[in-house]
Amino acid sequence: MGKLILVRHGKSEWNLKNIFTGWTDIDLAAEGIEEAKNAGEILKRNTIEIDICFSSYLKRAIRTAWILLETAEQMHVDTRYHWKLNERHYGDWQGKNKEEVRNSIGEDYFLNVRRGYDAPPPILSKEDERNPKFDPKYSRVNPSVLPLGESLKDTSKRVVNYFFEAIAAQLAKDRTILISAHGNSLRALIAHLEHISTLDIEKVEVNTGVPHLYEFDGNLNILNHHRLK
Ligand SMILES: O=C(O)[C@@H](CO)OP(=O)(O)O
């Protein structure tokens, strides 16, 4: 049986300050480090042995994966990184306080962009210093595929594409996979895995540092899924 464990990174400094983060590479806060340790303890308690770990390119997810694997005494695990697991790119909202954005544009528009499926945030200009093409981390990625602001639908395309490119075949071979990623990149993947409609995905929230286990049959149908404790 293929097993997939999804974990959202522990709280970052900007989660605590209520600032839109997206692709901004903010590290874990002290509380987030504790959440990652706790997630590792949970894996240990449930005697889950990871075969392959996947993380985004962002240090809050990478550090969560490292701390979790260290705590679970599984530092040897093959760990792979990909930008397609990154958080949704929040365009010009990145670096802005969520409350201030809400007050400036109104509740409906704010919620539609923040939790809706189709609506993108204001898109960055190509010259904006927040364009990922200026970040050496993405120097090997064709700049034309790097986002300047994404709807959840845009995020979903790259996350689900990476799932089929790199992860699905491992699950079909009965491997146990850990993905350390982000609130919205995981919402996109969860919507795909659980066949959640574009309307219902608005209500789905992913908590920081809480491992969620999915078990699959050989045809990648979900047999069951639950939060690990
Ligand atoms: O700032 C972000 O990148 C995300 C996740 O923290 O925010 P939100 O939950 O508001 O979509």
Image (cartoon, helix red, strand yellow):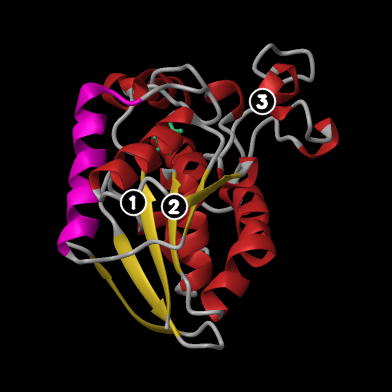
Comparing 150 with 158, the one in front is 158
Residue 77 - label: 2
Instruction: Decide if residue 151 is on the left or right side of residue 16.
Output: right
Residue behind mark 3? 137
Q: Could you classify mark 1 by the number of other residues whose Cα lies within 10 Å: few (under 14), some (14-19), or many (20 or more)?
A: some
Q: Earlier in the sequence, mark 3 or mark 2?
A: 2
The answer to whether the residue bearing label 3 lies less than 8 angstroms from the nearest atom of ligand 1 is: no
Whether residue 197 is visible to the viewer of this picture, yes or no, is no
Residue behind mark 1? 74
Comparing 86 with 195, the one in front is 86
Query: Which of the two discs, 3 and 1, sits closer to the camera?
Result: 1
Comparing 155 with 202, the one in front is 155
The span shown in magenta is 28-45
Circles 2 and 1 in contact, beta carbons < 8 Å: yes
**Magenta: main secondary structure:** helix
Whether residue 50 is visible to the viewer of this picture, yes or no, is yes
Residue 43 screen position, x and y as percent: 24, 58
Residue 23 screen position, x and y as percent: 56, 29
Q: Circle 1 — which element?
A: loop
Tag 2: amino acid: Val
